Image: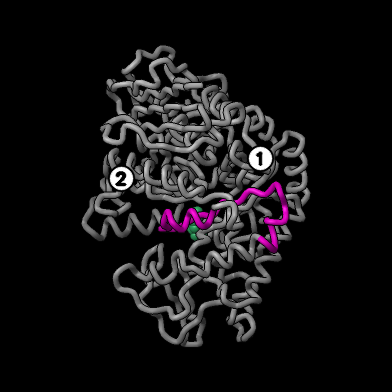
Amino acid sequence: MTFNDKVIYQIYPKSFLDTNGDGIGDLLGITSKIPYLADLGIDMIWLNPIYPSPQHDNGYDISDYKAIDPIFGSFADFDEMIRVGKKYHIEFMLDMVLNHVSTEHEWFQKALAGDKYYQDFFIIRDQPNDWLSKFGGSAWAPFGETGKYYLHLYETTQADLNWRNENVRRELIDVVNFWRAKGISGFRFDVINVIGKDQQLLDNPVDGGKSEYTDKPIVHDYLQMLNQSTFGQDNSSITVGEMSSTTIENSILYTRPDRHELSMVFSFYHLKTDYENGDKWTKMTPDFAKLRDILHVWGKKMSDGKGWNALFWTNHDQPRALSRFVDTDHFRVKGATMLAASEHLSRGTPFVYMGEEIGMVNPDYQSIEDFEDIEAINAYKMLLKSGKSETEALQILQEKARDNSRSPMQWDSSKNSGFCTGKPWIALGNHPDINVASEKNGEIYSFYKKLIQLRKDQEIISKGSYIPAFEDSDSIYAFIRSLGKEKLLVLNNFKDQAVSFKTPQEFNKADILISNYDNYIPGYLQPYQSIALILK
Ligand code: NOJ
């Protein structure tokens, strides 16, 4: 499958639709909504982890790679989901968390029990080095009663796997092939650029160890090997690597077709533009100039270097972009459609995060009790300790916590917004009026549909190169796509104020391909207006 004209929809399974009343979304819920997603026009659904897990990190702590957690359903439900998907020409992408396993995984348990073969599956040392866990504190925890320590770059119960061990690699290849045989053609590889730790495990007081384990050259070898022994054997596979603190140069190498590594990468710099002094747990208006520059640099360099970006504004680790970048009290609809245009008309593969197509906003949880994520709870404690009041700490969580995008999908105006009949595992948001029933024929949903279709109809969108435009503008994020004789100028006003600009002369006679306002006055953009001008 070529993937340039495809659009992927991300489902956070726990929060999509519950059909058995246990308050947790399930596979049957997903299957029942395939016709809805087919109407939207998407090609593939990415599911966050659905494997057995103690759920310390919501499924990213896997205890069995080759099974389905009963909270989500059975293999029969899974097969049915794939079958219905095929009927509607929708394929599935599974989350492959191959950097670490849960400490409840059989491999870790055997290692703890003294089995040397399995001890070699992990990174175990007599003494910890100074590396920091991404979830706070040291990246090392005591390995049972042995007096030794094991590495966990994430939560304590997520033990990093030793990719240098050939037996580990063989097991992981087997995992990917297991799911291929079950009809899976898409794979999202979790934090895949940190699998190749430097062998020496040296201290690094400057960056908490990041440069010792991120983007090491050996990651490229591992990906080529994985590609060759698994998904690279299917013409139709689509893969995306989640890249932690990566570089553009490496991202080009990860995705350039002749390298046979991955189809595309997720990077996150554009979503750190509201981190005050680099600190996520702060309240800050996004820095537009920084955002614009990051999008331009990544857009252009990836285009010039023949790499490929995964395009997204929101995922399960981010607050909802609409609440982040837009004055939703006054411009929710125009803001949602502007963000959509700025993503879907760009170069790369767009990902729609569940609820984005109806303009869902952050849940605005009013109490710390509403938050479920371990990261948010740790951050709340840390903020109080640093002297913030409970109200201030809560306000920061309301803007930054990952739970902001994990609140349940809102289907209609019935109890729990139609998500479940029982007690939901996580609180519903405080904006029940925004739901599929009320938005399905509305402006945002229809605009998404149009954008998804346009990518299929217009090669300039799926294949054109990316050239930055209006690079100094304080309000407009603009770029030109170019393919053969055709050119497409895309202008997006990120501000709640109208703005004027000078249309580049060559576009004076261009046609409007799409706009989120009914009228367009040349040289003038209304608040959050997007317009795409095409020159044939
Ligand atoms: C990235 C995932 O998206 C996130 O949810 C998870 O906590 C970490 N990787 C660790 O697996």
Residue at x 44%, y 69% (from the top left corner)? 213
Label 1, label 2: how far apart the Cα atoms are: 33 Å
- Label 1: state its secondary structure: helix
Which residue type does callout 1 highlight?
Answer: Ile
Q: Quadrant of the N terminus?
A: top right
Q: Identify the residue under disc 1.
A: 30
- Magenta range: 228-255
Question: Disc 1 or 2, which lies upstream in sequence?
Answer: 1
Q: Are marks 1 and 2 in contact (CB under 8 Å)?
A: no
Mark 1 neighbour density, 10 Å: few (under 14) some (14–19) many (20 or more): many
Q: Position of residue 134 (x, y in %)?
A: 40, 63
Residue at x 41%, y 24% (from the top left corner)? 530
Q: Position of residue 439 (x, y in %)?
A: 53, 23
Q: Position of residue 513 (x, y in %)?
A: 49, 20
Which residue type does callout 2 highlight?
Answer: Asp
Give the quarter of the image for residue 409. Answer: top right
Mark 2 neighbour density, 10 Å: few (under 14) some (14–19) many (20 or more): many
The answer to whether residue 408 is visible is no
Q: Which mark is residue 193?
A: none
The answer to whether residue 234 is visible is yes
Query: Is residue 399 depicted above or below 216 in this figure?
Result: above
Residue at x 51%, y 82% (from the top left corner)? 144
Residue at x 34%, y 23% (from the top left corner)? 504
* In this view, the mark in front (1 or 2): 2
Query: Is residue 404 depicted above or below 523 in this figure?
Result: below
- Label 2: state its secondary structure: loop
Q: Position of residue 45 (x, y in %)?
A: 63, 42
Q: Identify the residue under disc 2.
A: 274
